[in-house]
């Protein structure tokens, strides 16, 4: 006998949006989350002590008015009134130990032909380096675009599929173009977790998945859960591992998808201590960090926050403090434990040909009550995750569940 209509493993935006669709349809739903916090990559760290109330984003920082499926959910759970427009501040480049304006780093003569090179260009089947490099020219690509794209996806961007990087979607005119929420994007995860009909069990890691007739049984350290349908909404490497025993035909293609690791450090500093003008963030070129994302998009009178996303395995803690100090113009003493917070982030490292892997996965899922969602299908953006969840929910319904 199944305890649940749908069991979801992972309470990031993919799992929580799936839970939203299922709970809204009146299905008995449960979400298992290994961490003590729901949200996954939606992670607005809220400081305590003297900085009480100040937050910064350790993961995703921006949503856009093109995120139609996300916005439809926010509207249904009455969160649209908590949207906060991001202040219009720009990115700058940090290279050779100094902060530069982006226009000063561009080779204008090489850019002049870009509109003509765009004519007839197709992204499909091409890498970011190949597609964008041939539009903006090799010097512009190396000086500005490669570092900027790597900053967006927190990994070396060159081999990423060009069509997975930016996706054109219709924009809603009644919503700010770029937005967060009061309290940060974590507010989305917190609100979805509290939606009637959604129960998120924190600190509950799925260890093993078994089939029991037509049902699924998930084993955790605290016991087992049986459900009529199962949705995996974990990072791809975890999904591959959990599916290995009972569903090797799914685990095999998933195991081909690589993962990029990011060593993230957030720091809060008093406004008066910093000389940098307000900015959206620093893009690292030939640097140990891909980016330093700023909280200046949601200004605070007392503190500023910066989240450094470091390349993995390059610097130890002292080295990171030194780089953060150099970029922000702060002494190392500014990075005490009460002002800093660390996290390991993971993102899929998609490659050209990824669509064929996903076709194989979707073929293997067809006809089953097993669903897969997350950031390793069409792209890594929040909206890509929500859209995948919506599609998988519709498919489960079509399977007669
Ligand atoms: C630094 C960074 C910046 C980003 N910036 C943006 C941005 O500005 N805008 C944007 O649109 N996107 C951004 N993204 C991408 C986007 O945030 C993520 O791709 C998306 O949030 C991933 O959601 P998810 O639910 O698929 O996975 P996750 O958020 O990774 O959630 C997976 C969940 O599964 C849980 N889990 C893992 N193993 C188990 C297990 N065995 N049992 C139970 N639970 C388990 C994890 O703890 C986690 O909570 C950013 C990502 C990062 C890392």
Image (cartoon, helix red, strand yellow):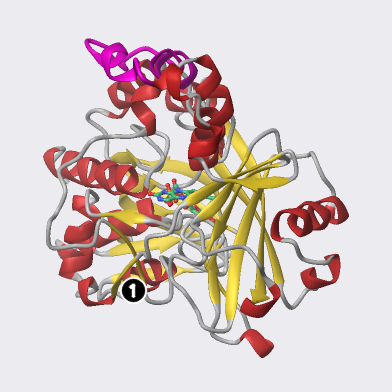
Residue 303's place in the image compared with 328, above or below, is below
Residue at x 71% of width, y 69% of height = 340
Residue 230's place in the image compared with 301, above or below, is above
**Image location (x, y in percent) of residue 350:** 48, 27
Which residue is label 1 attached to? 191
Number of marks drawn? 1
Determine if the magenta segment contains residue 118. Answer: yes
Nearer to the camera, 110 or 221: 110
Ligand 1 contact, mark 1 (Cβ < 8 Å): no
Q: Which image quadrant: the N terminus? A: bottom left
Residue at x 56% of width, y 41% of height = 154
Residue at x 74% of width, y 38% of height = 96
**Image location (x, y in percent) of residue 365:** 30, 29
Determine if the magenta segment contains residue 5. Answer: no
**Residue 74: which quarter of the image?**
bottom left
Classify residue 292 as left or right of residue 20: right
The segment highlighted magenta reads 112-136
**Residue 179: which quarter of the image?**
bottom left
Can residue 135 be seen from the camera position used here? yes
Can residue 6 be seen from the camera position used here? no
**Image location (x, y in percent) of residue 299:** 46, 74
**Residue 119: which quarter of the image?**
top left
**Image location (x, y in percent) of residue 380:** 41, 40
Residue at x 28% of width, y 19% of height = 115
Residue 295's place in the image compared with 205, above or below, is below
Q: Secondary structure at mark 1?
A: helix
Q: Residues within 10 Å of mark 1 (few under 14, many from 20)?
A: some
Nearer to the camera, 350 or 244: 350
């Amino acid at each position: 006998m199944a305890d649940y209509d749908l069991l979801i493993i992972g309470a990031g935006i993919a799992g929580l949006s799936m839970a939203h669709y299922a709970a809204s349809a009146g299905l008995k739903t449960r979400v298992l989350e290994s961490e003590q916090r729901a949200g996954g990559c939606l992670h607005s760290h809220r400081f305590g002590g003297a900085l009480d109330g100040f937050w910064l984003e350790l993961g995703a920082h921006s949503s856009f008015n093109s995120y139609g499926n996300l916005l439809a959910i926010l509207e249904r759970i009455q969160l649209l009134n908590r949207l906060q427009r991001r202040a219009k501040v720009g990115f700058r480049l940090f290279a050779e130990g100094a902060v530069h304006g982006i226009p000063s780093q561009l080779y204008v003569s090489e850019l002049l032909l870009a509109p003509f090179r765009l004519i007839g260009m197709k992204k499909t089947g091409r890498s970011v380096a190949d597609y964008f490099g041939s539009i903006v020219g090799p010097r512009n690509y190396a000086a500005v675009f490669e570092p900027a794209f790597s900053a967006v996806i927190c990994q070396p961007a060159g081999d990423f599929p060009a069509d997975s990087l930016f996706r054109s979607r219709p924009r809603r005119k009644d919503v700010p173009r770029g937005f967060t929420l009061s309290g940060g994007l974590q507010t989305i995860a917190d609100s979805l977790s509290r939606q009637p009909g959604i129960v998120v069990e924190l600190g509950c890691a799925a260890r093993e998945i078994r089939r029991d007739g037509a049902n699924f049984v998930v084993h955790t350290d605290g016991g087992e859960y049986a459900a009529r349908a199962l949705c995996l909404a974990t990072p791809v490497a975890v999904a591959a591992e959990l599916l290995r025993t009972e569903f090797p035909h799914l685990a095999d293609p998933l195991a081909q998808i690589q993962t990029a690791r990011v060593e993230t450090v957030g720091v809060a500093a008093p406004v008066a201590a910093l000389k940098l003008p307000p900015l959206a963030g620093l893009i690292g070129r030939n640097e140990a960090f891909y980016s330093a994302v700023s909280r200046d998009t949601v200004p605070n009178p007392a503190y500023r926050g910066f989240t450094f996303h470091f390349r993995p395995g390059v610097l130890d803690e002292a080295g990171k403090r030194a780089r953060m100090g150099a970029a922000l113009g702060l002494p190392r003493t500014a990075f005490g434990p009460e002002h800093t917070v660390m996290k390991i982030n993971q993102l899929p490292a998609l490659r050209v040909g990824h669509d064929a892997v996903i076709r194989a996965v979707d073929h293997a899922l067809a006809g089953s009550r097993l669903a897969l969602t997350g950031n390793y299908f069409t792209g890594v953006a929040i909206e890509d995750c929500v859209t995948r969840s919506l599609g998988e929910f519709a498919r489960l319904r079509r399977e007669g569940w």
